[in-house]
Amino acid sequence: MLVFVAFVLLFIIPLALLFLSMSGEEAGKSSLEQARIAARIISDEAGEVYLQGPGSKKSITVNYPSGVADGAVEGGLVVLTMDVGGRRTDVASPAFANITGNLSGRRNAGPQRIDLFYNHSLGAVVVRYG
């Protein structure tokens, strides 16, 4: 019986801890990939609104993963800042359109409504939460 307990303590518990830590890393990778997809959808939709020209607008729903700490629209990029594994990581997607806007602030995981509209005086697509 003592040998069995020693076996459990020496082999099974460290293996269980190893598998748990690996699953946490995979969840972080999954969240980053979901953030890349969300940023890409926003930048693609901004490009579509840009191509439609003045007066065009659109509302979209994008699914954010857990860990979105902040967002920005700057320099032709849609940037989502993620908190993953205790580190901050930026996920960016370029847009061919001239874009501006505000996606700042921590957001909960789940669907986010985003409004996009072409501002003729700026000559740019404005991106903001709806």
Image (cartoon, rainbow, N blue to C red):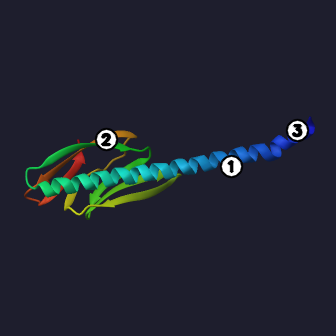
The span from disc 1 to disc 3 (Cα, nearest Å) is 20 Å
**Relative to 99, does residue 12 appear above or below in the rendering?**
above
SS state under label 1: helix
- Residue 32: image location, x then y, percent: 45, 53
- Residue 124: image location, x then y, percent: 15, 59
Q: Residue at x 55, y 50 (%)?
A: 26
SS state under label 3: helix
Do the residues under discs 3 and 2 have CB atoms within 8 angstroms?
A: no
The span from disc 2 to disc 1 (Cα, nearest Å) is 35 Å
Task: Give amino acid for label 2.
Answer: Gln
30 lies left or right of 20: left
- Badge 2: residue crowd in 10 Å (few <14, some 14–19, many ≥20): some
Q: Which residue is mark 3?
A: 4
Do the residues under discs 2 and 1 have CB atoms within 8 angstroms?
A: no
User: Which label belongs to residue 112?
Assistant: 2
The span from disc 3 to disc 2 (Cα, nearest Å) is 52 Å
- Residue 86: image location, x then y, percent: 52, 52
SS state under label 2: strand
Q: Quadrant of residue 94?
A: bottom left
Q: Which residue is mark 1?
A: 18
- Badge 3: residue crowd in 10 Å (few <14, some 14–19, many ≥20): few
The total of numbered circles placed on residues is: 3
Task: Give amino acid for label 1.
Answer: Leu
